[in-house]
Image: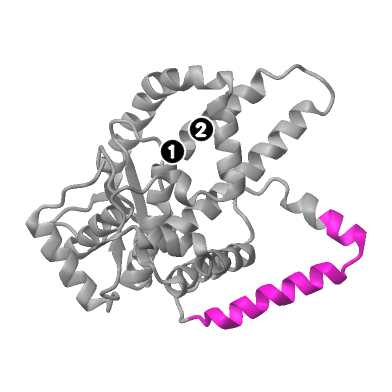
């Protein structure tokens, strides 16, 4: 459902846009669906679960698993974090509202919390139940630019729009129901991990749909990868991505095999892959078609 912003929120968002030099051509996407921007691997895996008998467990997860998890997490967020509102971190609140609007709105509207942590990071439970939320760390808020922070917010909102936790949970249920045959469980877990990594690509695309500036999203990804808030050169990093691909191609089969095994259990793609993948999507006709359906902010 499209989010209806109050006049005060719109004014605050406009003020934030002016201070961060957000392009005036940015648009919101009121009719945006997750399938419009999901990465192909994420889309295929999600569709497979939605078409399977596992869909009959969806209500049980939404009504049985989600509420207590969300309630417990919200209590922790309220107890240990600072809730972002029009009075508390007002500029960050306006940026969050703008990001939600860019992605077509969310109902119910997620809450945003800031928590103390020396590492720049953000996360969400990715269940659109009764208490969705996003948490960002103090290091990210203090060290990233307003535009980069909004890119990170857009990424986390992408998880909510796609309801990744819901579909991952159903996929995990499916894995436990598989027959105990040799290799079956390992193959299912490998597919689950590939799906999780593909979901990160989807959410990087969501971040791009919010900022509508690939350089901003790439800068945020590079800073998260390096742990440093110093300025970065995106073009140089893309050159590094090409260098990585060339080095990998020239490596022996043994090295490539070992590299694949080391990355098999990773929940996130390699940072170098994420920036390169984002660059390809930003140049695609698919991205242009999505923006063409937008409305001015």
Secondary structure category for the residue under label 1: loop
Other-residue count near label 1 (Cα within 10 Å), few / some / many at <14 / 14–19 / ≥20: some
Is residue 83 depicted above or below 270 in this figure?
Answer: above
Secondary structure of residue under mark 2:
helix
Task: Report the residue marked by disc 2.
Answer: 167
Q: Which residue is at 32% across, 43% downward?
A: 133
Q: Residue at x 62, y 46 (%)?
A: 41
Of 143 and 2, the residue lying toward us: 2
Residue contact between numbered discs 2 and 1, judged by CB atoms under 8 Å? yes
> Is 122 drawn above or below residue 234 in the view shown?
above
Per the rendering, the mark at residue 163 is: 1
Q: Position of residue 287 (x, y in %)?
A: 47, 62
Horizontal side of residue 225 vs 65, given as left or right: right
Q: Is residue 93 magenta?
A: no
Q: Is residue 152 visible?
A: no
Describe residue 236's horizontal placement relative to residue 220 as left or right.
Answer: right
Sort mark 2 into few (<14), some (14-19) or many (20+) by Cα contacts within 10 Å: many
User: Which residues are the magenta region?
Assistant: 232-258
Q: Quadrant of the C terminus?
A: bottom left
Q: Position of residue 286 (x, y in %)?
A: 50, 59
How far is mark 2 from mark 1, CA to CA? Answer: 7 Å
Residue positioned 38% across, 69% down in the render: 148
Does the magenta stretch mainly form a helix, a strand or a loop? Answer: helix
- Where residue 77 sits in the image (x, y, percent)? 30, 42
């Amino acid at each position: 459902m499209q989010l209806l912003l109050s006049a005060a929120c719109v004014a605050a968002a406009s003020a934030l846009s002016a201070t961060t030099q957000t392009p005036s051509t940015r648009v919101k996407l009121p009719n945006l669906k997750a399938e419009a921007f999901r990465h192909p691997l994420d889309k295929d895996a999600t569709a497979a679960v939605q078409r399977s008998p596992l869909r009959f467990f969806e209500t049980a997860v939404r009504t049985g698993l989600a509420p207590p998890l969300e309630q417990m997490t919200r209590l922790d967020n309220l107890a240990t974090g600072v809730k972002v509102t029009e009075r508390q971190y007002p500029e960050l609140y306006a940026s969050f509202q703008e990001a939600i609007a860019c992605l077509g709105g969310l109902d119910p509207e997620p809450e945003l919390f800031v928590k103390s942590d020396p590492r720049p990071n953000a996360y969400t439970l990715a269940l659109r139940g009764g208490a969705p939320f996003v948490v960002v760390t103090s290091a990210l808020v203090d060290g990233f630019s307003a535009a980069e922070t909004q890119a990170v917010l857009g990424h986390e909102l992408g998880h909510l729009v796609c309801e990744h936790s819901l579909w991952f949970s159903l996929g995990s249920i499916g894995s436990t129901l598989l027959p105990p045959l040799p290799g079956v469980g390992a193959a299912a877990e490998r597919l689950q991990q590939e799906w999780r990594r593909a979901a990160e690509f989807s959410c990087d695309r969501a971040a791009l749909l919010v900022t509508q500036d690939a350089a901003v999203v790439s800068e945020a990804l590079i800073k998260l990868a390096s742990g440093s808030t110093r300025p970065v050169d995106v073009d140089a990093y893309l050159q590094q991505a090409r260098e990585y691909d060339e080095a990998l191609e020239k490596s022996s089969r043994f090295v490539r095999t070992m590299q694949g095994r080391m990355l098999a259990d990773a929940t996130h793609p390699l940072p170098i892959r994420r920036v390169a993948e984002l660059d390809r999507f930003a140049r695609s006709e698919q991205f242009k078609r999505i923006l063409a359906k937008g409305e001015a902010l």
